[in-house]
Amino acid sequence: MENKKLAVSVDDLTVAYNYKPVLWDIDLAIPEGVLMAIVGPNGAGKSTLIKSILGIINPIAGSISIYGKPYDEQRKLVAYVPQKGSVDWDFPTTALDVVKMGTYGSLGWIKRPRQKEKKAALEALEKVGMLAFKDRQISQLSGGQQQRIFLARALVQNASIYFMDEPFQGVDATTEIAIINILKELRKSGKTVIVVHHDLQTVPEYFDWVTFLNVKKIATGPVKDIFNDDNLTKTYGINYKVSVQQ
Amino acid sequence: MTSAQIEIQLIASVVAVACAIPGTFLVLRKMALISDAISHSILPGLVIGFFITHDLSSPLLIILAALSGLVTVILVEFIQKTGLVKEDTAIGLVFPALFSIGIILIAKNANDVHLDVDAVLLGELAFAPFDRLLVDGIDFGPKSLWIIGSILTITVVLLMAFFKELKVSTFDAGLATALGFSPAVLHYGLMSVASVTTVGAFDAVGAILVVALMIAPAATAYLLTNDLKKMLFLSIGFGVLSAISGYWLAHWLDASISGSMTTVLGVLFLLVYLFAPNRGLLSVLYRNKQQRLEVSLLTFLLHLNNHSEVEERHINHLNEHINWQKVRSKSVVDLALKNNMITIDDSIISLTEKGTSFTNKAIDYIITNDDTGIESMKEDFFLFRG
């Protein structure tokens, strides 16, 4: 593992809302090419951690680097899938148009998406199995379809690192399997995928790396080494017994 | 038409277009009320600018007034961020305070000049053609047309340049940040345009009606389309329509032009609210009725599918078997017949092949919620449109 490059490194990160710390002195080194789950109870700061790495929230202390450089310089290497509930699905726009938004980052200010961007968006839609719905107004999509659209929007960014905030929330089993298969493919092609995840049962099956978080970092490392009752208990505060199948 | 009449309609139309553009984004950002706040709180800036320049159409006055509009936005956000009160309360705190400062300034100092509270609240479009832009004695048309025309030009240029940025930051501020488009810059940019437009439109239509011109066309357009660009064009269209027909309504009633324009906007919204193809009240009621009927149809088809015995399929026994009123049974049977899903042979109803396959597909969809099999049925049946 020592030879592997670090995709993301977080040093001494502290974030507070109204002077109340939600993340406390986090150090985190995420090696390139892992499919990592961030787990922890509600209010543990999982989403906050992702948002801080992406510059959406300003930390009060600490630093973050993406492949050794600040996020501002490495924007194009990073794609982000926010929580589904974070946007207004009644917004007047179509599935294709939402996916095209993923290309805006590489376009920069003022330049408009053209044929090339449209083609990339259509390809991403096809990858998530949503090509037939490209002209559908986004409020007319089911929860699982909306999540796939968000995933397609991240895929179109063709990034090296993908951050996803609870992509399995409110989706049916078919969509969950479709999404995890795409994430596994991303890892296979050398990308790093970081997922805020809620369902502890599926961690060993879906992920190869895990970070336990509860305001402080409890543990981080390969699932097979650290996904155990001890860390779960430390993170969730109660005597946690999941039968972990290795 | 006299040239003054044409000029008034032109000014009203340009004002309407200039308001509709920022208004569309305000509506989508759920910030409609902030335009109300801005339109009132530009008053102190306007009054102070007037004291300095003694000219209601001076650029300095417009800038000062727009700045006090921006101050409103900043104060509202500041109060809201304390977490002590919610946004609507913050708006309600800020703009009356600023507005009343303006009122006091007018009362103390401007009693003798052409700046009274009525003009500020209601504006007077009819006088607009009298204030001409004269350069070296040559008449270049009404001053207010030049002012609002310049504001509109700037708005359109900004809109075309930053359309994609405005769209993404309105839809998903988090993504906009992550992609490097600062939502704060876009937010204050939009607020600046809204403030400047309000000031420019103010002279013509007054503080209260500016709000109507920003919000009503956008809200009306929102009911009609699922495409942001179309929504922009539609709200511009509704704005212009209300400007011109409002003018003629005022002419006919011998009443206030701005009042008539707003009345037209209200009527337009009401009509669209009632008759819009998808989201309109009537279409929703019709859809609900159809869906109820379609559920009955499906129940009926299922019944036929489950029962091969003749007595369960006799047309006269339907009422007792599925326990429906006569009218309902009749409309269900008619619908099934119309779609060739059943045949009636000697008062005995049987499913056709089409009816069987429809029933099976529908059941599949309801059980699995997988709608790939029923794509083709969505056209004819509301039930499957989610």
Image (cartoon, coloured by chain):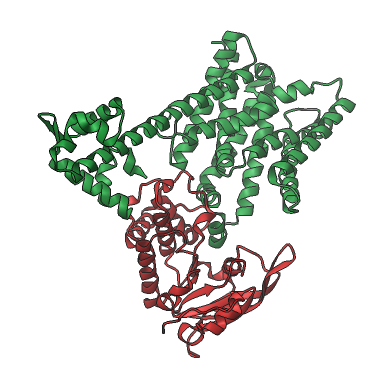
In the image, is A103 to the left or to the right of B350? Answer: right
**Residue pictured at 88% horizontal, 27% vertical:** B109
Compared with B229, A192 (above or below) is below
Task: Pinpoint residue B68: horizontal percent, then vertical percent.
Answer: 75, 40
Task: Pinpoint residue B173: horizontal percent, then vertical percent.
Answer: 56, 54
**Residue pictured at 46% horizontal, 43% vertical:** A92
State the image quarter where residue B337 is shown: top left
Chain coloured red in the rendered structure: A
Q: Residue furthest bottom?
A: A2
Between B23 and B326, the one lying in front of the other is B326
Task: Pinpoint residue B15: horizontal percent, then vertical percent.
Answer: 60, 28
Identify the colour of chain B in the image. green
Question: Is residue B341 visible in the rendered structure shown here?
Answer: no
Which quarter of the figure is the C terminus of chain B placed in? top left
Between B341 and A203, the one lying in front of the other is B341
Between A97 and A215, the one lying in front of the other is A215
Question: Is residue A88 visible in the rendered structure shown here?
Answer: yes
State the image quarter where residue B378 is shown: top left
Between A200 and A207, the one lying in front of the other is A200
In the image, is B186 to the left or to the right of B48? Answer: left
**Residue pictured at 62% horizontal, 49% vertical:** B187
Task: Pinpoint residue B260: horizontal percent, then vertical percent.
Answer: 60, 18
State the count of labels: 0
**Residue pictured at 77% horizontal, 40% vertical:** B93
Q: Residue furthest left?
A: B346
